[in-house]
Amino acid sequence: MKRLYLLLSGVFAVLILLPLLLDKYVIGIFVMIFYYAYLGQAWNVLTGYTGHISLGHALYVGIGAYISTYLAQQLNLTPWVGMILGGIVAVLVASCIGFLGFRFGLRGVYFVILTIAFAEIARLVVCHIKPLGGFAGIFLDFRPSFYNLQFRGNVPYYYISLGLMAGSVLFVRLLEVSRMGRLMIAVREDEEAAQALGVDSFKYSMLAMGISAFMTALGGTFFANYVYYISPNTVLSMGLSIELILRPIIGGLGTALGPVLGSFILTPLSEISRSYFAKGGLEGLHLILYGVLAVLVVLFMRRGILLYLRRALAPVLRLEP
Amino acid sequence: MNALVVESLSKNFGGLTAVQGLSFELHEREILSLIGPNGAGKTTVFNCLTGFLPLDSGDVRLGDRSLKRLRPHEICRLGMVRTFQIVRPFLNISVLDNVLVGAMLRERSLARARAKALEVVEFVGLGRFSNALAAVLPLPLRKRLELAKAIATRPRVLLLDEVMAGLNPTEVDELIQLIRAVNQEGISVLLIEHVMRGVIALSQRVIAINYGQKIAEGRPEEIVKNPAVIEAYLGREFLESQG
Amino acid sequence: MSLRVSGIDVFYGDLQALSGVTLEVKKEEVVSVIGSNGAGKSTTLKCISGLLKPRRGRISFEGRDITHSPPSKIVGMGVSHVPEGRQLFPNMTVRENLEMGAQFPRVKALRRQTLGQVFDFFPRLEERLNQKAGTLSGGEQQMLAIGRGLMSRPTLLMLDEPSLGLSPMLVSLIFRIIREINRAGTMILLVEQNVFHALDICTRAYVLENGSAVMEGNGQQMLQNGFIRKAYLGI
């Protein structure tokens, strides 16, 4: 294991120094890589570790984005507090969904539909609420300061999102080996068998829902103050829900580094296609590439790229098989 | 002294009566077997005892505590644990981690839980495989794992659901030894079984049920000669094949 | 008219499940395969019916090479596989499950006649014709599984652990019926954990351990064999 930690520390050190070498545009790509890795990780906590599939996680991004933005604009409340409040609301909403799903027995496909429904309802409701900007959304005022979680240039955002990503990896890694994490994994593997061994699967499923929602909402606040524009279509859309699950799935569901790996692969693709190919009218090319990649992974590396990478590198890194 | 008391247990599915007024006791430290044809209601009884199905009427008492309306994990917490007919290992984690889940019920400290899990893994003879993924284990070893997970929860009562199915006689013998050892640790055992070899070798008492009702109760030697049991379940050729 | 398996090696990924397995089922025979769990008994049947492909070796049925044939073709040639655990279609009725077994034109035309024959072996199925398969008792499900296997009018019927989960009385009944099926002209290849019944009913038997056939012989003789009695019957 030691060699792996050494490698990861080295990568982290490189990442810390990178902004000194790169131009603003490339730094911006990294911000997105870290951001999507973080969102994917938040989703991973629920789906990768308890096995409940959510296809409506954009709901929590939106909650975080809208609540912190609204409070900042109306009450001049710092987004650093706003994000916590957004997180709390996200947990409450997630608890409702969880209750409906786990207590009332809406499982499997029905749970997925439930999560989609909540997200879509939220999106449509926000579209019709004028104070929240309706369809057009909200443009955030540019008032750079630490208090406002707004900065000139990309470098501060780079370090914040790097911190989010690294922090989430650490958190998930500690969760994996903790008592709570192990019981969540048991629920994922076989919920009834876990119950038969005394595991309160309802409690652990709800905990995962809450943690996942809270983390995601924080990301929403960050995003709002990075792009200075939020709208139902950018932070509450089905498209976002799918974008954020692709990285953990391709990288490796149920692993701490999977979402990170997935984001390093997919995000550059989407960012580059957005800018380079847009000129040629091929702006959505990355979606086709996503599809191809997803098919390849499903066919040949079903557990995600990380596990295959691990197996290949195991001798070099002296990992247990 | 009774470890488990079942009183007038009844369960219907729509118009179908699966179990009807079934009463029996499992004595402290006893091994009791429940036999009967498929569809006689045995698994339904298990599911009702362990909270996976609600009882329609009657009561189940563990010691002096009623288990009616309790959820499966609460019943396990009170000291009664079950295995599943079709084994259900946590496939993507190691043997040790599988058993650890059970051990964590009683130990808040991860270190102590792991120590207990290791002890149980050795006890069932899976020591060599503690770090192997459960998915690589063949069936007889998966059955031992199932048993290990259950024992790790430190139960007072162990319910084994057709744990000997699919094993050849030698493998059955090994499992018999293991169950005996578990019983000697003070755990009362209730078995549902078709493998009569196991029933006869292990049980102090046997209860035969058919159509959701008790048709006979007694020592194994008596039960295999009981005409109602032979008629409903064993068949005359059974006695011949015991040659 | 026979099945011949010669030296097959089967792998699951990197894991070798069968190593040089050779066996034969001749006309009118009942052949049993016994051995520990994980020895490769089910794997052998799956290989013959085409669900798995061997890396090496040959399988021929009635003189024709079926080593790499697709399962549908093998069924069409008269080999029927009743899998372990029955694997019925639980939401379909008894009738529908049986009809599923007779999809090829050749056997579809004779379906009514074949159904009649199946009911001769298993009258209880006729009583439950319109009942959903998932609601049948264990014994009835096993009868249905075998009945469905018979619907393709096979010359070779392969049974994987027909006694699994059945009461002693039903096990005796099922084995009696298997004997009748054989007498009516179908070759039987049987994989079983219930060693007593497996050896009692068969003409010849193979013992499979660790992916190889380690012993072969006449059924009754093996029942009396000291090693077999000790190792597999626990006597």
Image: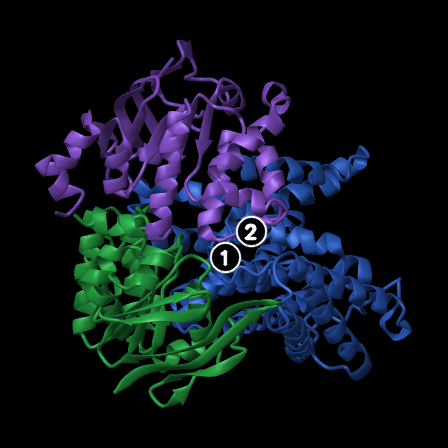
Chain colours: A blue, B green, C purple
**Secondary structure at numbered mark 1:** helix
Q: Where is residue B208 in the image (x, y as percent from the top left)?
A: 34, 66
Q: Where is residue A24 in the image (x, y as percent from the top left)?
A: 66, 51
Q: What residue type is labelled 2?
A: Gly
Q: Residue A215 vs residue A153: left or right?
A: left
The answer to which image quadrant residue B149 occupies is bottom left
* Residue visible at 37% across and 27% down in the picture: C188
Residue beneath disc 2: C134
Q: Which amino acid does label 1 sit on?
A: Ile
Q: Residue B127 vs residue A5: left or right?
A: left
Q: Do labels 1 and 2 share a chain?
A: no
Disc marking residue B206:
none
* Residue visible at 34% across and 20% down in the picture: C28
The answer to which image quadrant residue C46 occupies is top left
Judged from this view, the residue extending furthest toward the bottom is: B64
Residue beneath disc 1: A16
Mark 2 residue crowding within 10 angstroms, few (<14) / some (14–19) / many (20+):
some
Q: Where is residue C37 in the image (x, y as percent from the top left)?
A: 28, 42
Q: Looking at the image, which is closer to me, C91 or A314? A: C91
Q: Looking at the image, which is closer to me, B134 or B229? A: B229
* Residue visible at 44% across and 79% down in the picture: B74
Q: Looking at the image, which is closer to me, A232 or B189? A: B189
**Quadrant where the N terminus of chain C is found in the figure:** top left
